[in-house]
Amino acid sequence: MAAPHLPRGGADRTVGASTGTVPPLADAPLAADLPARLAAAAPRVVVLGDTVLDQWLTGPSRRLSREGPVPIVEVDHTRGSPGAAANTAANLAALGARTQLVSVLGDDGDAAMVRELLAGYGVDTSGVVTDPTRETAAKRRILADDALVARFDTSPREAPGARTREAVHAALRAAVDGADAVVVCDYDGGVLDDDTVALVGALVGPRGQRTCRLVVDAHAPARWAATRPDVVTPNAGEAALLLGRELGGPDRVAAAEAAGPDLRARSGAGAVVVTLDRDGALLLPDPAGEERAPAHRTFARPAPEANTCGAGDTFTAALSLALAAGTPLPTAVELAQAASDVVVGRPGTSVCGTGELAERVAAAEGPLLDAASLAAVVDEQRVAGRRVVFTNGCFDVVHRGHVASLNQAKRLGDVLVVALNSDASVARLKGPERPLNPLADRAAVIGALSCVDHVTAFDDDTPAELLGLLRPDVYAKGGDYTPEMLRESATVQSYGGRVVILDYLPDRSTTSLVDRIRGGPGA
């Protein structure tokens, strides 16, 4: 598995024109450029906890077994993913954090697979202790034509021995030194004992004086109360366990908000983020802390229950990344919700990359992606083996010729990127009365076409700088040009790309359309 690529050129790079002063991460709002900025900041995050191998065995089912009324699945594909704390670590690394995992694995094939998967994401596993006496935890699911037939789990039967615990503590001491955040993933897997809890508290120090953030994602958050976490992230069931009662009533969000003081007191946390799956998440900040803000709710993208496996790990990872880089807590929670929305759109345990997260955030803002975020998306598409096509233009009044050209461009590859001239660029090229439609409107129309995958903008007279950043496989241009007429052709050819001139449709131009409109009924 290839590790996701980070965007080239830095998180705050702009193409062609300055977009103004970029706010520091401590004041950063949720915006499409935030994931790339966080990746460029590359905070150092230590993940401590239980590790699992998640595996899916899939294939068709055409008959029932004679041994019992069960389907026979002809497995033709097996896929593995890091699970539990390892999934949190993989998500952190995919989002740009320098990530180290401290955990315990057995000395078996499942452990080897987990290590290989983590290496693919760039996770430092030097703190993962091998215990040959323990079996690596695994969750295997059998799917017949995408329908879950059965799941079977294996897990260690005993807690780690004294030598293994000592090795984990030594790895933790070395890892925490200089970390920007420590994330605890305690899923009752036996790796973390009471001595480990005490050690974490001693290493990070008192809240308010510590140099790193402590985020706890635990089935039993009360166990970590003495460490005074900065944030705990219980789900509805874990919050109920913490309170000793269910989040009753028809409105779980209101019930969780009302329970805020109790949740903070019993978890020892400065802030509590209750994740409520289909109901989003609720941030309950410390009323005496720096945030001094009311409760903040996010709203989730609806998804089938089968697709939510590992979404909590992704949520915790994105939240921890943002906090480690100094992002405000409400912004961090919104970013975490966006990341979990990405992975619930796919079956099985999944990892959210920087480009995917930027695209999800941008979708909430509108179709325009900034250059750095788009570079991350294009890199991920290229790693996945997809052919990227790029075209550009003013697209002031979209007409039949535009649609035909864009459809033809899309057929040259798998992913079509359309770069729009900024309003200032259009005015320089077409005259002071243009554009007729502002950039946001033009982007909305182009982005709504099914053949268009991504939309961005540039301020120069040509997209040469943007082409150099994205390095698409194909640069497609309308049929009223030749490659020799295009100054940007040299840029494309310099990195081995191909310039393609699209078919020309006569009498199909915005300028001629505007002239006819201005000419009145007899034009």
Image (cartoon, grey):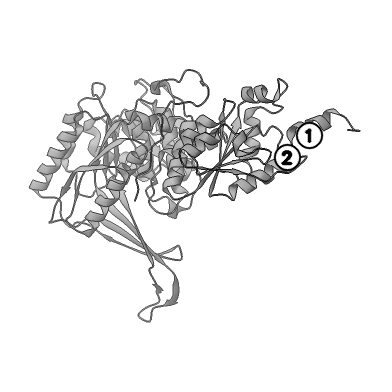
Q: Position of residue 202 (x, y in %)?
A: 16, 30
- Mark 2 Cα-neighbour bin, 10 Å: few <14, some 14–19, many ≥20: few
Left or right of residue 388: residue 220: left
- Above or below residue 76? Residue 204 is above
Q: Secondary structure at mark 1?
A: helix
The disc placed on residue 136 is none
The disc placed on residue 399 is 2
Q: The C terminus is located in which quarter?
A: top right
Do the residues bearing badges 2 and 1 touch, measured as CB atoms within 8 Å? yes
Q: How many numbered callouts? A: 2
Label 1 sits on residue: 513
Q: Residue furthest bottom?
A: 66
Q: Secondary structure at mark 2?
A: loop
Q: Position of residue 282 (x, y in %)?
A: 43, 35
Type of residue at label 2? His
Evaluate whether residue 292 shows in this view. no
